[in-house]
Image (tube, rainbow, N blue to C red):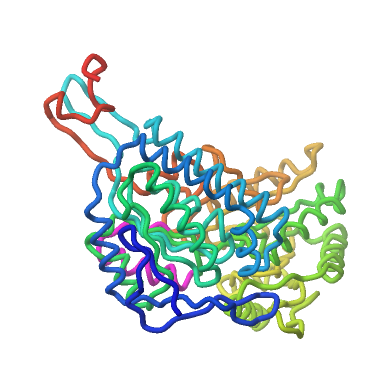
Amino acid sequence: MLKPVLIAGQWRAAHADGGFHADDPTTGQPLPDEYPISRWDDCDAALSAAAAIRDLPTDRIARFLNTYAARIEARQTEIVDIAHQETALPKTPRLATIEMGRTTNQLRLAAVAALDGSWSLPTIDAKLNIRSRHAAIGPVVIFGPNNFPLAFNAISGGDFAAAIAAGNPVIAKAHPSHPGTTRLLAEEAVGALAEAQLPPATVQLIYHMSRQDGLRLVSDPRVGASAFTGSRGAGLALKAAADAAGKPIYLEMSSLNPVVVLPGALRERAEKIADEFADSCLAASGQFCTKPGLLVLIAGDESEKFVAAIQQRFASRPSGPLLSSAVSQSFASSLKKLQSAGAKTLAGGEEIPGPSWRYANTLLRVDGEHFLSQPEALQTEAFGNATLAVVARDANQASEILAKLDGQLTGCIYSDTQAADDQLYVLLSPILRQRVGRLLNDKMPTGVAVTPAMNHGGPYPATGHPGFTAVGIPASMRRFSKLECFDNVRPHRLPPSLRDRQEK
């Protein structure tokens, strides 16, 4: 029997065109529960229910977010168990400690921001009696990713927390890799809504839909904005549909997260950097949006030794399962494209036989001339445990390579601590800075701290717009807002945040 969808506060039978099962990545076999592929009727009903919601009180929003965090924690064991079953990500520390902690922390940070209100940037020109602020944009549709079943889940993650804190109802579209995890989280959201006395349609859940209905959903007149984390192909299709309808959509699509290691850093601490690089590339089988997929070196003995050290680490470490058959197929296709473009396989490159979807840890290599001859093909993202090393002839060629990069979420430069690489840094860092949302020094990019100073965004095509971040409250909330202006409006009719002090 198909699991019900959550629409307008009710768990009800879906209007479905068939169903689907999540798979166990460790066995490659479908899990027992079946979830519906909703027809447009479900999307339409959810949109109508969400569109009827106006002016959610900030104190109740904050109460919901705090209550929801507490309810998730109270049910942690069950949620972690099913998330592990659906993704094969380790229960500890990944799910139970790291991801669970991040999930509840960002919900609570969103509650604080909702109450504080400064995120809305109230601006007052008392002389002209013109006032403006950011305010809720309306129903937000969130498409969650496959690789973070808790902290980026469409119904509990960063996009969700930001959209709710900004005062919007959310329609969550679950990822088919972990529908059971999403269902448990939704059950706790329903309880938290009741405790906070918010409208039941503030949070709704649809598990899956056709491609056509997904495109229709993000372009519907009732939608305020959408958020998507996933593949470039799916993201660009949604963007085209939303753009054609004039609807905002915030995308996180793909990124190679280049790591540049300069010669002085290699002379100083090559083994340490090799360990950090391998750790970052292979964590969770490389299924992080900030995984280093590109290594840039300058030719020399130190670089050759470093490549050999990375090769040894990739070859000797076990590889974990990929999240799904779709990820495995995409990974294989990406490797083939990179190899066809001339990348030489130094380690891995082949599927590991067995019931789960595994590939050997893969290190590829090209020289700088070859990369510059085919920069588009050699920037194919292999979402998984693979990285391409590019060895530049000299510093000038390294700068040409960086200048050819697409927009990225992150970019990192490792340099000598005694200033031996400073001239190279001055040459390369301004070029890399223009192509990344977050520039790092001497630190791998896979950690994304939940702090107001964080930017988890970047130039296209890493995201759809370089001016926004998916992590970092309160800035992430403004994606789901519209700018409201009040011109000569009588004081008692103004929102409290825009009134003169004596009127508040």
The outermost residue toward the top is 502
Residue drawn 51% across and 60% down?
184
Residue 238 inside the magenta-drawn segment:
yes
* Image quarter of residue 379: bottom right
Residue drawn 25% across and 20% down?
504
Residue in the foreground of this view, choosing between 288 and 95: 95
Q: Which residues are the magenta region? A: 232-250
Residue in the foreground of this view, choosing between 126 and 134: 134
| Main secondary structure found in the magenta portion | helix
Residue in the foreground of this view, choosing between 229 and 339: 229
Q: Quadrant of the N terminus?
A: bottom left
Residue 242: x and y, percent? 31, 64
Residue drawn 66% across and 73% down?
322
Residue in the foreground of this view, choosing between 189 and 168: 189
Q: Is residue 77 above or below residue 60?
A: below
Q: Is residue 104 above or below residue 332?
A: above
